[in-house]
Amino acid sequence: MPSAAQQHHLEIDAQALREALDAHQRYLAGRSGGRRFSLTYADLSNCSLEGVDLRDADLSGAKLSGASLSRANFSRASLFGADLREADLRHASLKRADLRGACLRGANLAGAELAGCDLREGRIALQDKLDGFRILRHEHRPGELNYAVLSGANLEGAQMGGAVAMASDFTDANLTDAVLSGARLARAVLDGADLSGADLGGADLTGASMRRAVLAGVNLDKARMDNCDLEGVLRGPPPSVFIDDRPLDEVLGDHEAYCDSAGQRGAVHGLPGVDFRPLRTLKRRRLTGLAAPGGVFFGLDMEGVQLQGADLAGCDFRGTNLREADLRGAKLTGAQLSRADLRGAKLGPLMIAPGRFVRTDLTRAALRGADLRGAHAARARFLEADLNGARLEGCDLAGAELEA
């Protein structure tokens, strides 16, 4: 006996699907004959819609379990109550999509764009000729994200209050300002996730892993955190930082004077483990040879900064703007560079004498989702580096050491 959901799902043949897609493209382009893609309650399980543009489409209640939807554009689409179990949604855009009541159990949303989407629980009532209205039920609870993969996904401002995402993978995801109040996140992996300003009030984080997660301005009121791994979490920045009773900015000014005068003025200080966030910006500062291993630069504007030959091992550069930065010969072993903007950055060798140079070392660095388009990384070392989801178009990697 088929379930209520199966009874209401409509079979769609390949020709009808192609016609609906073609009509939707005309609709988006404003051409004659255009018609909004509307296949509510359709059975599209295991179909391939990779890379299709379905902005503003209506797929309410549709069955898309096991479907190949990678890089598809569902921005502002209605997926209310849709069945997306085990669907491939890698790098798909679901920006401001209505996912209320959708079942995403086991779905792969790695690198997906989910900013402002609505993932709260919801239910669909369908009219039945014999029984009146009945609830469309999935085999699992609506609004479920159990075992889903959301590593590197952008969930900024997502509405996830009451969501069920037990054992889901949010590694390095952007959850800034997301609403997760009352969410069930037991055993979820939130390692490296940015939860700045998120609402986790009343959430169940029992047994969750939040290693290196950013918890600046997070509401954790009444949240359950039994056996939660909080190793290396990054909380809000201090209001100011002093080095030997001197403001950090003044100390960096000394360093710049030393660089500009070839050592005739100023002074160089070792700055291990310093939190640079109170400065807000290091844009175009001249900090050649800076020794700041283990430093925190999270989210700073460092466009065009000069850090040639700097010791930046183990530093936190997640989400940092390093566009056009000069990092030639820098030591970046074990650095956290997930989501960093390195477009046009100089990561090649630093010449120290005729025929002698120092290579930029990114051994074991985390570059998940980093943007390296147009960067110059000739001869750089990327041994054991994590480049999953990194953008490398136009990056000069001539002679670079990369894992096979």
Image (tube, rainbow, N blue to C red):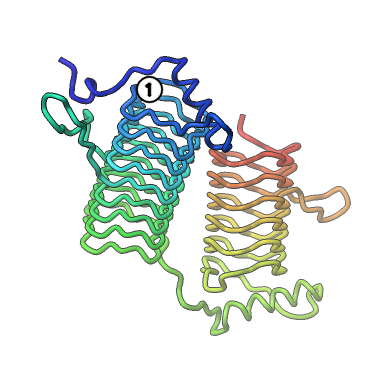
Quadrant in which the C terminus appears: top right
On screen, residue 80 versus residue 344, left or right, reads: left
The amino acid beneath tag 1 is Leu
On screen, residue 396 versus residue 204, left or right, reads: right
Q: Residue furthest right?
A: 354
Picture quadrant of residue 268? bottom right
Above or below residue 394? Residue 49 is above
Quadrant in which the N terminus appears: top left
Residue in the image at 53% along x and 44% along y: 368
Above or below residue 92? Residue 286 is below
Q: Does residue 80 appear in the picture of this structure?
A: yes
On screen, residue 48 versus residue 218, left or right, reads: right
- Disc 1 element: loop
Q: Give the image location of residue 319, x and y in percent.
A: 54, 55
Q: Residue furthest front?
A: 32
Judge by depth and name the residue closer to the eye, 264 or 74: 74
Judge by depth and name the residue closer to the eye, 358 or 76: 76
Q: Give the image location of residue 280, x and y in percent.
A: 56, 70
Q: Which residue is mark 1?
A: 44
Q: Give the image location of residue 6, x and y in percent.
A: 24, 21
